[in-house]
Amino acid sequence: MNDADIDSDTSSTKSFSGIASIGESFVPSQHHKQAAITTLDLDGLLHPPIQLKEDLKEGCGGQLWPAGMVLAKYLLRYHRYDLIAKTMHVFVDPDFLELGAGGGLVGLAVARGCNLNRKTQITDQLPMLELMQSNIRENGLEEKVTAHIFDWGSAMSSELQNSFTSSNGRPDIILAADCVYFEPAFPLLKRTLEDLVSDKTVCYFCFKKRRKADWRFVKSLGKTLTVREVMEDEEKESSAKEGIHLYEITAKRRKG
């Protein structure tokens, strides 16, 4: 998909209603490799590096996923100092939210390496909560990052919603990496993005295309949101060869 802006006229995603949580962090892990801690400086972009514990005992969200690495490096390389300027809140520090954080790679990297003044909220399902909290402590980022339970398609907890300073209770910047991998969860993710992306929101959305349904899902987002492929990443060509694609998602402009 090479279009700079995606506007879909078809979507084959099945609808699921009343589903707040699916399985063991959506996809159960088939191979429980031994838990280990990985040191990541993201090609020298993080000083000091972060220590990330990988643990698959509660699901595959507990491992490092490739799109998370791509998104974290992109944000550190191109938006280390201007994430505040990317929002429309000129005089207010933006609120950050990571969806489907797993072990928290992207949120932790941004909290450590970018010029932020507010806490980053990282979220996932209940099975990932302990791992997120462990990685926050391991990196001494308790003052910069908070972990929450957030099931796609469900309402945010009052604690999470109250962490945002905007009057509409939504984040200004959303981070989402490798959230496109389990087709039954696509309607829930789409609903969550539609609920959270306001006219003052930027969502950085990075995923690895594994099947045709993944493309259909991204195209379906174009019906209700503006989806623009990020072109300025120096790793774009190599990432594309691995099937990894990066987008900015914003609200559609109102006509008239």
Image (cartoon, rainbow, N blue to C red):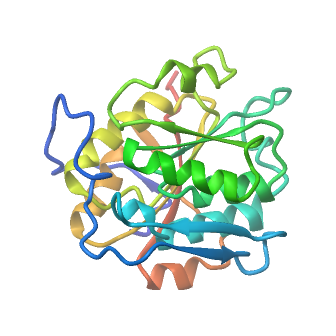
Query: Is the residue 108 above or below the residue 63 in the image?
Result: above
In the picture, measured across the screen, residue 58 lies left or right of residue 175, that is left
* Viewer-closest of 227 and 110: 110
Q: x, y percentage for residue 4?
A: 50, 60
In the picture, measured across the screen, residue 147 lies left or right of residue 59, that is right
Q: Quadrant of residue 122?
A: top right
In the picture, measured across the screen, residue 202 lies left or right of residue 15, that is right
Q: Quadrant of the N terminus?
A: bottom left
The count of marks equals: 0
Outermost residue on the front side: it is 34
Q: x, y percentage for residue 111?
A: 74, 51
Outermost residue on the top side: it is 167
Q: Quadrant of residue 112?
A: bottom right
* Viewer-closest of 81 and 7: 81
The answer to whether residue 10 of the structure is visible from this angle is no
Residue positioned 82% across, 30% down in the render: 90
Q: x, y percentage for residue 230?
A: 58, 62
Residue positioned 29% across, 53% down in the render: 217
Q: x, y percentage for residue 213?
A: 22, 62
In the picture, measured across the screen, residue 164 lies left or right of residue 123, that is right
Residue positioned 45% across, 66% down in the render: 55
* Viewer-closest of 35 and 59: 35
The answer to whether residue 31 of the structure is visible from this angle is yes
Query: Is the residue 236 above or below the residue 221 in the image?
Result: below
Residue positioned 49% across, 31% down in the render: 196
